[in-house]
Amino acid sequence: MSSRYWIITVALGLTLNAGSGYAQEQTGSSDGQPDQQQAPMYPDIPSPFLVEIVEDETTADALKRSAEEARQREIEGLAAQKAMNVATQSIEEATVDMRNYALASTISVWIGTFLLIVTLILTWMANRAAQAAVRVTRETGRDQARAYVEVDAVKFYWGTKAGQKPEFKISLRNHGATPAKWLQVRQDYRLYTHKENESVPTNFQNLRLPTEYDERWNGLASSENEQLTSGPPIRDAQEMAKCRYDLPRAGYTPALNTHGVIVFGEVRYCTIFNEIYTSQFYFGAASLEAFQANEPEIIDKRQGQNEIELVRLIREIPQSLSRFPVKLDLYQKHDTK
């Protein structure tokens, strides 16, 4: 502690002692003993006296500088505390900002992840759509290029004027742009009567087809021209005569035919894409006209015994059967075998 503070302390102590003695003196006088002096309570302690504190300029300057330094330190402490408060507030604000930024970043990441998933899903769907479009395009190209084979017509021949060699012939046609690699046919015919209680069979599913197909034919080119081949073999020529309706002759009244005929079957073929298809057919006639032929053609001359014999060719005019209103399956695809 500096000398100044020690001097101030001693002065204050002496002042307090002087005040205490004076108070006791006033008390004794008030009790009725004014003429008798009261003995001091503490004779060993000297009586107070005035002290004048004298400081030199150096000490005063030092005290002044110390006070200014203390005040400056106080100001600096307040400034530092204020700066600390500002820094603390800034840290708190920065913490709040960081928390908000972290929350915003998390939300942004989730949104980005969601959008990425949506993008991946849309990309996957777009790829599937593109693949489907490619498949559709490829299938459309195949549809335009593949073979479409069907029986285009059924024709009937009596064979002779007496009708002894009747036969059916079917006309095959490929409506596609490419040939069929091979084809097979299974077919049959059936007579039906013209009785009032019997009608023409119109349900293809109720007709009985042969179980096996005929032998394979090697290819059928794409062409607008028909290709005739043998139809179902006729089992009984006399039975077929029940369908014949002879032309009227002078003096005779022709008997009406009692039966009609239907020819039905199925064509099975293979396209160049190794696809198996089938087409059903159904033709019929309520009656068959009698034998008709074109004018005979002379195709050769032979020397006979007495004269030259001419070889004539008689070409029968075939009768075309009609399509009946029956539900058929045309160009139906089947499993490859």
Image: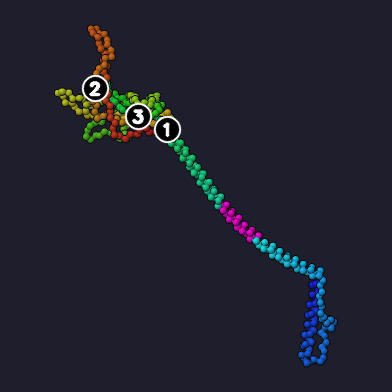
Q: Residue furthest left?
A: 251
Q: With 126 as the anchor, is 261 left or right in this view?
A: left
Task: Verify whether residue 193 appears in magenta.
Answer: no
Q: Amino acid at mark 3?
A: Glu
Magenta: main secondary structure: helix
Which quadrant would the N terminus be assigned to in this image? bottom right
Rendering coords of residue 300 (x, y %): 28, 12
Q: Which residue is mark 1?
A: 141
Q: CA distance from mark 2 to mark 1?
A: 47 Å
Q: CA distance from mark 2 to mark 3?
A: 28 Å
Q: Amino acid at mark 2?
A: Gln
What residue appears at the point 26 percent right and 8 percent down from the top-left corner? 303
What residue appears at the point 21 percent right and 25 percent down from the top-left corner? 246
Q: Quadrant of residue 232?
A: top left
Residue bounds of the magenta highlight: 87-106
Rendering coords of residue 248 (x, y %): 18, 25
Q: Quadrant of residue 17?
A: bottom right
Label 1 packing within 10 angstroms: few (<14), some (14-19), many (20+): few
Q: Amino acid at mark 1?
A: Gly
What residue appears at the point 16 percent right and 26 percent down from the top-left corner? 253
Q: With 117 as the anchor, is 169 left or right in this view?
A: left
